[in-house]
Image (spheres, helix red, strand yellow):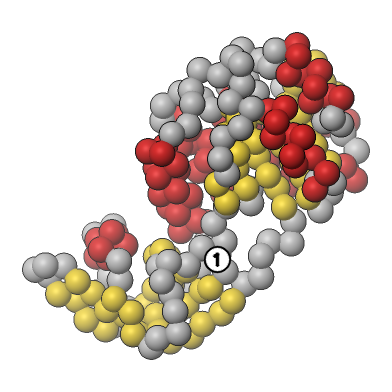
Amino acid sequence: MSKMPWLYCPTLVEHDQIELPPAELRHLVGSHRRRAGESLVLFDGAGAIAVAEVRELVRRPLRGWVEIVSREIYPMPGRRIHLASALPKGERQGLLLDLATQFGITDFTPLDCVRSVARSGAVGYQRWQRILIESCKQCHRPWLPSLHANCPPNTFLSRNISSYGAVLLADVNGQPSREVDLDIIGAASLLLIVGPEGGFTVAERDSLLESGALPICLAATNLRIEAAAVALVAMAVR
C-alpha cells in the first residue's frame, strides 16, 4: 500500500465503484501518471482507507472511475497533540501546517495574539484544508488534523486546558527542552503553544503560566514561528 498513490475522497462510502473527484483525478493521471488497471489508495480523512483499481478513464472531459478492492477502518489517533500557534506571514503558514501534520498533530488552532502580524480568514481556512489533505496524502495519514476557529490565547486556554495532560509553551526563557521530564512530553494529550515572533505580551505570558503552561526553551536563538512550532511538535513525538 505504501507505494501506491493516495487520493482524498471525502465521500468514500460503501459502493463498489466510485467516480474520482476532479482535482484528485488530475493528480492521479498527471503527477502519478496512473492508467487504467493500476492501483491506488483512497482515504476520507476520517479513518476510512480503501485500496482501489482504476477501471476507466475518459480524457475529454477528464473523468475516471475506480473499483474498490479492499477496505479498512483506522481508529482515531490514540494520542492527541493540539498545536495552538500565532500565524506567520504568507506562505510560511502553509509550511507550518505541512510539517506539523507530517509530524503528527491532531488539531490546530490559530491564536490571535496582541502582537500577531497575521490573522486567519475564510480563504485561509480553505487553503489550510488543502494543505492538510496534501500532507496526509504524502505521509499516508488516515486522519486529517482538525482545524479550529481562531481565538485569543487566554480565552483559548481557559476553555481547553482541563482536557490536556500537559501544556507546553515555546519560550526563550523557559526550561531547556533536553531537560524536560519525558513523562510530561509523553502525556496522552498535549497542548503545544507558540506565540508571535514579537513574543507574547507580559499579560498574555503571565496568564499562560498561571494556567499551568510549562515554558520550554527550544533553541538558543530566536526562532521564527513555524520553526518553533515544528520543533515543539517534533519534541512531543520523539
Give the image location of residue 20, x and y in percent. Answer: 30, 71
Instruction: Please tell me which residue lies in front, 122 or 237.
Output: 122
Left or right: 147, with 58 as reference point = right
Q: Residue at x 81, y 18 (%)?
A: 206
Would residue 232 be visible to someone looking at this image?
Answer: no
Residue occupied by mark 1: 46
Q: Residue at x 26, y 83 (%)?
A: 55
Q: Quadrant of residue 35?
A: bottom left
Would residue 96 be visible to someone looking at this image?
Answer: yes
Give the image location of residue 103, x and y in percent. Answer: 62, 47
Left or right: 91, with 45 as reference point = left
Left or right: 109, with 158 as reference point = left
Instruction: Please tell me which residue lies in front, 46 or 233.
Output: 46
**Circle 1 residues within 10 Å: few <14, some 14–19, many ≥20:** some
Q: Secondary structure at mark 1?
A: loop
Instruction: Please tell me which residue lies in front, 149 or 97.
Output: 149
Count of all numbered marks drawn on residues in the image: 1
**Type of the residue with mark 1:** Ala
Q: Residue at x 64, y 27 (%)?
A: 152
**In the rendered image, the vertical position of residue 12 relative to residue 215, given as above or below:** below
Give the image location of residue 109, x and y in percent. Answer: 60, 39
**In the rendered image, the vertical position of residue 170 relative to residue 6, given as above or below:** above
Q: Residue at x 22, y 81 (%)?
A: 56
Give the image location of residue 210, x and y in percent. Answer: 87, 24
Instruction: Please tell me which residue lies in front, 205 or 24.
Output: 205
**In the rendered image, the vertical position of residue 64 relative to residue 102, given as above or below:** below
